[in-house]
């Protein structure tokens, strides 16, 4: 695991504790494991960040932060991975989630035209809402599992590589 590289780019814990959106967590931000990078906190942080990225809610970063605090995993990684969902990737990810949900429910995907209005959201909750939310949940869980085990295996490989290098 390129621990030194990741730690180099991790933000200062003191700055994050004072961040306006994270201040709601107060003293909970003083757990040391939230700020360290180790074999237990990194895989969980990846799982939480990837899961939260698929959730179609505003303030995904706060969800990721709350889950990182609850599960006592690295907070900066959890929050940073939420940015996989951004204005460029969101349409593709969420359409993919809708398609997966439609396939799982056995419904053919419907054609729809997005409108930025409350009326469109209300009418869509009954038509495209269920497959979309199901797809988001399923893809969030799958991404979390894949991310978790990928980081666990990368960490093991990194440790084995260092041991082999040390033996030579």
Image: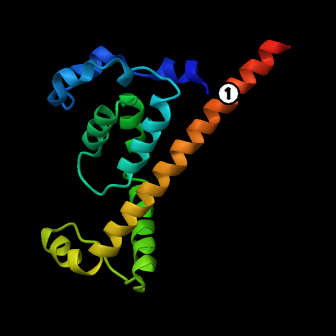
Q: Residue 93, located in which quarter of the rendered image?
A: bottom left
Give residue 158's position: percent from left, percent from top: 67, 27
- Establish if 69 lies above or below 100: above
Give residue 81's position: percent from left, percent from top: 42, 40
User: Can see residue 94?
Assistant: no
- Establish if 116 lies above or below 36: below
Give residue 62's position: percent from left, percent from top: 25, 39
Residue occupying image coordinates x 26% and y 81%: 127
Callout 1: few (<14), some (14-19), or many (20+) C-alpha neighbours within 10 Å? Answer: some
Query: For this rendering, which residue is in front, 58 or 133?
Result: 133
- Establish if 50 lies above or below 40: below
Query: For this rendering, which residue is in front, 132 or 20?
Result: 132
Quarter of the image with the N terminus in it: top right
Label 1 SS: helix
- Establish if 8 lies above or below 148: above
Residue occupying image coordinates x 27% and y 43%: 63
Q: Residue 167, located in which quarter of the rendered image?
A: top right
Residue corresponding to mark 1:
158
Query: For this rendering, which residue is in front, 90 or 53?
Result: 53
């Amino acid at each position: 695991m390129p621990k030194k590289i990741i730690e180099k780019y991790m933000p200062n814990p003191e700055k994050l504790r004072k961040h306006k959106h994270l201040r709601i967590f107060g003293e909970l931000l003083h757990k040391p494991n939230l700020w360290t990078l180790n074999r237990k906190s990194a895989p969980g942080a990846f799982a939480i960040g990837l899961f939260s990225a698929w959730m179609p809610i505003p303030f995904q970063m706060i969800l990721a932060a709350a889950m990182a605090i609850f599960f006592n995993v690295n907070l900066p990684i959890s929050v940073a991975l939420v940015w996989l969902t951004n204005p460029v990737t969101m349409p593709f990810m969420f359409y993919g989630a809708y398609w997966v949900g439609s396939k799982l429910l056995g419904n053919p995907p419907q054609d729809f035209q997005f409108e930025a209005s409350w009326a469109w959201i209300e009418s869509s909750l009954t038509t495209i809402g269920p497959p979309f939310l199901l797809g988001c949940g399923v893809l969030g869980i799958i991404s979390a599992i894949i991310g978790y085990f990928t980081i666990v295996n990368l960490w093991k490989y990194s440790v084995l590589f260092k041991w082999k290098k040390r033996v030579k």
